[in-house]
Image: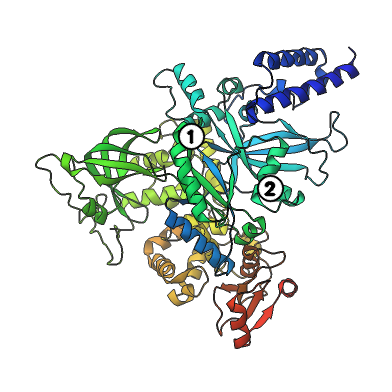
Amino acid sequence: MNENEAKERIEKLKAEIWRLNKAYFVDDKSEVSEDVRDSLKKELIELENEFPDLIAPDSPTQRVGAPLDGRLPKVRHITPKESLTDAFSFEELEDWKDQMLRALGKEEYDFEYLCELKIDGLNISLVYERKPYGSVGPGGRHVLARALTRGNGIEGEDVTHTVRTIESLPLALDLSDSNSAPDVIEISGEVYMPKKALEKLNANLTESERFANPRNAAAGTVRQLDPKIASKRDLNIFCYGLDGETSNSLGIKKQIDLMRSLMKFGMPVHKDFVLVSSLNEADKLYKDFETKRDSLPFDIDGVVLKVNDRRTQKELGSTAKAPRWARAYKFPAEQKTARILDIELQVGRTGAVTPVAIMTPVQIAGTTVTRATLHNEDEISRLDARIGDTVIIQKAGDIIPEVVEVIKNLRPNGSKKFRFPVKCPSCSSDLERPGDEAVTRCPNPQCAWKLRGQTEHMASRQALDIEGLGKETIDALFDMDIIHSPADIFFLSQEHLSRVPLFKEKKTGNLLSAIEKARRPALPRFIFALGIRHIGRENAEILAKCVKWPEGETKKIKGIRPTEILKTIRGLDIENFSAIDGIGPVLAQSIVNWAKEKSSEAMLDKMEKGGVIAVIEEGSHAPQVFKGKTFVLTGTLPDLSREEAKKMIKERGGKVSSSVSKKTDFVLAGTEPGSKFGQANELGIKIIDEDGFKKMLS
């Protein structure tokens, strides 16, 4: 056989092996025996050994590569990854629908929902890139280039070497008949381990090595450095997402069409997705799968509902963390019983004092639980939880263990009610509880436990993202009197870290590099890192727009000094902040209170001395053509989503209001405008369409 004949034979073998693999692993149809598939693969291996120049990345023989020699590299996602907001009751689904109606400016709307099983696995992003090779034609073939974990949503771990061992996953997509497909395609999926595969795996592991549940096993396997280990563990994947550019290029208008497109690509998709026209239908489906979940070959923890119309999805947009057009309708948490051995108190970064039950160990949702939150003083009183009680616990959202009920018939004789302290367990300051709050707080800004929590928050991924500065390291630094406040991290040296257990030269260097990088945070990240009570990432972005760039210093420092930020915040009062769209009186009071604290000034001053300067990212300083102007949006715009239009207005100094008043300057109206259109006419407010709006942008 010459090289041309071998090339033709190899292409045919690859196509047939993939067809048989897809039938077996994806479509659950066994057309031939496993021996036949193995025989074809053996022939392919022999041909590739004879003609190594003909080995292609999408060959079935190339699923297992060489092991990595170190930690998993981190790679930036093409598009930021979002997580789903959970719903635990039908009432929460109804609230979600109301939220969407308000966001759309409609009183009623006939939503269609695509319902999919929520697989309990590990989220993975698959990137396929067009490669011009083989006999596919001039369009080439999209080849699996990389697979990334979700990570922090911005970047994930590169686990291509293990994910490509999944037999059901195509290593290449033949889209040569679709010239409109972009060169890079990103597909989202969930890697999981079937229940029987976990049983088989655990049977060959020691007791200490065994995995508690299929999800842990899948996550642990995907992160193996040696792909040969992963190839023996029977991982699988279901795909459900496709990047926006590809969806638009292929003209996908509905979520159900997206799923059908994935199936057409040859991607493994769980076929039990159902299109419903009401939440009642979705609830019925949810209850049906709740009764079936134990009989399924894999773990599920609920049903995902997605608005079917992709245009409506775009208009609804996303929060900082999650799409507004989807909900994870979660099954009730698994419940177990345990005995309370003690009740401890924890003080968080805002001073909130949280009682925690220390319990006899119990397995719940696949993990061993020994601690569960009792939330606050009122919850302890409601439960009448006492040391020695037998309690029912569950994981809230399958994450945080909580006590839900006390079995009082099993209460030991002589038990005493728990008395909530009046002094902080950390610093002995008098605790405070405002009349309108359920949470008791320590008011002392120098409380050691608060400062630890604030330091942990400042170093977290969503804040300054100081990799290597986790809770254990922070605790060690405080315990050894190396640091005493969050700002102290910017004065850490190699000498300091050499005293911390397990900090070798490489680990020390990595942390110091991460701290150096954190000295130039983007302004919204910096504000979020300050840990101002009630200020999340979205509010931090809003506040960043209020910070004045110091005149005459832009070119010199290329950023804003922390003390300048404080000066701006102190220059505004509660009324000023309350008037800002997205802030409101509660957040305004919190900001003003924080700015008054001497400890806030001391922290910012110390951070500045530590070399910290907040920077404004490129492109965030658009011409302030809407400064002082208030917009109201109504109806559906032809091209822009509501979120895109709002962003453009805010970036240019404008304000977006949800209601029309005499203070409104413009009403931006699309098709099918609501009552706001009529109100604007009555008040004589200028109404503009999308074209008029775009002309105003420059």
Residue 103 seen in render: yes
Left or right of residue 38: residue 346: left
Answer whether labels 2 and 1 touch (C-beta < 8 Å). no
Numbered badge on residue 694: none
Left or right of residue 574: residue 461: right
The residue at which mark 1 appears reads as 299
In depth, the one of 567 and 530 nearer the eye is: 530
Tell me residue 220's x, y (percent): 51, 29
In depth, the one of 203 and 31 nearer the eye is: 31
Other-residue count near label 1 (Cα within 10 Å), few / some / many at <14 / 14–19 / ≥20: many
Q: Which structural element holds mark 1?
A: loop
Q: Check the picture and name the quadrant holding the N terminus.
A: top right
Residue visible at 45% across and 17% down?
203
The colour scheme of the drawn protein is rainbow
Task: Judge whether 62 appears above or below 607 on screen.
Answer: above
The residue at which mark 2 appears reads as 257
Tell me residue 234's x, y (percent): 57, 24
Earlier along the polypeptide chain: callout 2 or callout 1? 2
For marks 2 and 1, give the CA distance: 26 Å
Residue visible at 77% across and 12% down?
46
Amino acid bearing label 1: Asp
Tell me residue 358's x, y (percent): 26, 39
